[in-house]
Amino acid sequence: MQTRMDGKVVLVTGAGGGIGRDMALALAAAGAQVVVNDLGTSTSGEGSHAGPAQQVVDQIKAAGGQAVASTDSVADSASAARIVQAALDHFGRIDGVVNNAGILRDRYFHKMGDDEWDAVIKVHLYGSYHISRAAAPHFKDQGSGAYVHMTSTSGLVGNLGQANYSAAKLGLVALSKSIALDMARFGVRSNCIAPFAWSRMIGSIPVDTPEQQARVDKIKQMTPAKIAPLAVYLLSEAASAVNAQVFAVRNNEIFLMSQPRPLRSVQRSDGWTVENIAEHAMPALQASFVPLDRSADVFSWDPV
């Protein structure tokens, strides 16, 4: 079972800190040549700085690995193409992509502005599309390649004040599944990870109540390094039979997440009216309704 990444070239976006940094370090330690992409912005996507990406590259090189820094943005197709081209220019190929770059603009939905919606969607969803699309022809031509997209339980389950982020992250699951369906015949795989980890982005979540503070305190126990092993595995040849799946990692737990499927059905041979939907269909289906819960309600026990 080949879990080493020797000879593989992997691009990690948002790799200047947090989860992305630890994935880049773990990939390099497993033998991969790594493109460390990070624009060096704030958690809300403002500003830029070359330092974070270069610091990770320097750390990889100091440990005997190979890496190159990229500070282009994922949110634009031309700059995303330059990030993929950096892998080709420096290492001659590309074998894996980790779509990890992200920002937060948290706001309750009735207060959210168009700029807050657009900024988050462009980085998370458009950014993952642009990077994935730029790598796709190379994966197709070589008959191999693997994508790992970082989703979130904010999209899979739900969360307060994150309509933009949640929509992007659930959209990313659908994008991953579509890539898997379209490119499986070329030996290309696409999977998602929903990470639980204390990072710079999580650190910006508003804490307005004792319950929210308690939740954040639990998240602080979970370090970004806990996410990296699954990402390396999914990019390795050992995961050749793993495609179109959604995983979550919470400290020492790995979850396989469900994907939408029919739960219950009702039918009438003479068709439905508004009245008999109200009298028959909804009462029959109601026992299987999904509750109005958040990720903290579903993952209610302490991390192990």
Image: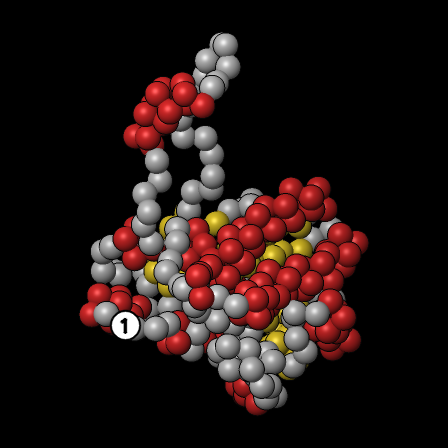
- Identified at 47% across, 34% down, the residue is 261
- Percent x, y of residue 123: 59, 68
Q: Is residue 255 visible?
A: yes
Structural crowding at the residue carrying mark 1, measured as other residues with C-alpha within 10 Å and reported as few (<14), some (14–19) or many (≥20):
few
Color scheme of the displayed model: secondary structure
Q: Is residue 30 above or below residue 235?
A: below
Instruction: Name the outermost residue toward the front.
Output: 275
Q: How many marks?
A: 1
Q: Is residue 282 above or below residue 252?
A: above
**Which quadrant would the C terminus be assigned to in this image?**
bottom left
Residue that badge 1 annotates: 208
Q: Which structural element holds mark 1?
A: loop
To which quarter of the image does residue 122 belong?
bottom right
Looking at the image, residue 295 sits to the left or right of residue 20; the answer is: left
- Percent x, y of residue 128: 62, 62
Q: Is residue 23 visible?
A: no
Q: Is residue 97 above or below residue 280?
A: below
To which quarter of the image does residue 252 belong?
bottom left
Taking depth in this image into account, of 210 and 174 the one nearest to the observer is 210
Q: Is residue 251 above or below residue 42?
A: above
Looking at the image, residue 14 sits to the left or right of residue 106; the answer is: right
- Identified at 44% across, 61% down, the residue is 109
Taking depth in this image into account, of 188 and 171 the one nearest to the observer is 171
- Percent x, y of residue 204: 39, 76
- Percent x, y of residue 96: 63, 62
- Identified at 70% across, 70% down, the residue is 76
- Identified at 37% across, 58% down, the residue is 159
Instruction: Name the outermost residue toward the left.
Output: 210
Kindly identify the amino acid type of the residue bearing the numbered disc 1.
Asp
Instruction: Name the outermost residue toward the top.
Output: 269
